Amino acid sequence: QFKTMYQGEAIRLLHEVVKKGNSTNEERDRFISLIEQAAQSGKYVGFGELAIRHYSQPNLSGAQKEARDISIPADHPWMNLLAQIGAKYNLPLDIHIEPDENTLPGFEKLIAGNPNTKFIFDHAGWYNTGEGTPKLFDRMLGTYPNLYASIKIRKPQSDEQKKVAIFDSQEKLIDSWEQVFTKYSDRFMCGSDVKFGLAEGGEGDESILVQYPKLLKQLPYETAQKIATENAKTLFKIN
């Protein structure tokens, strides 16, 4: 089944408000109205992918490069509004963040301040900062019971990406990742991050997607079943 998350006009308005550094009451009311409409429509299973910190791809330039270089304070007041509406309608927030000393405090403040909202920490196994390690996920998942995570598998292109990679050079699952996947087997999901029709650094859709069975085969059966499908079905209320 294909299910959709909301990333419409309200999110564009959020980006605009952050960029200019202030907002009017009318803009705030418009933002809330758009999010409420989306939540009430029944069309969406969550909000996202929401880019809190997103680095622009090196192959982009000009306006495209600027548009993909995104920085939004995770504890921005409007993010809290979004989280509150997410809790109200039981719709999770799917968060893209590059974890480091600048981004994590605000992200954790958002999660801690909204304990009834479910958050998905995107792209476990693929970060440009080198800080999205199994140790970090162990700490955060242990601290915040409302936090989930999605897995992204790619061939590392930098030393920082190698630090957080799920596989070693022989495509064997790193022990520390296996331990955290097993410990929090109810809260990890496969999240391919495939841009369908757009090759990523020479990797097409097919070569990316085949990495996930390689991961699942190296996990205990029950853990693999949960990460493959069961956790997503539960979180997104899929029958």
Image (spheres, rainbow, N blue to C red):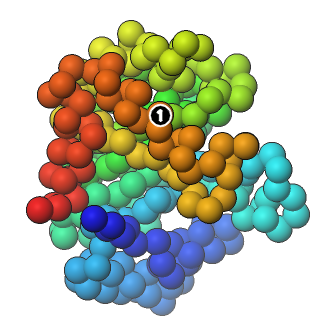
Which residue is found at the position 68% from the left and 52% from the top? 199
Observer able to see residue 129: no
Horizontal side, residue 179 vs residue 71: left or right:
left
Horizontal side, residue 72 vs residue 125: left or right:
right
Could you say which is closer to the camera, residue 154 or residue 85? 154
Q: Position of residue 175 (x, y in %)?
A: 39, 10
**Up-down relation of residue 81 to residue 143 (above or below):** below
Q: Count neighbours of disc 1 (C-alpha within 10 A) and say few if under 14, some if 14 to 19, many if 20 or more.
A: some
Which residue is found at the position 31% from the left and 67% from the top? 3
Q: Position of residue 64 (x, y in %)?
A: 78, 65
Residue type, label 1: Gln
What residue sits right under mark 1 in the picture?
A: 211
Q: Position of residue 221 (x, y in %)?
A: 18, 25
**Up-down relation of residue 7 to residue 98 (above or below):** below
Quadrant (top left, top right, bottom left, bottom right) of the C terminus: bottom left
**Up-down relation of residue 97 to residue 217 (above or below):** below
Which residue is found at the position 17% from the left and 45% from the top? 230
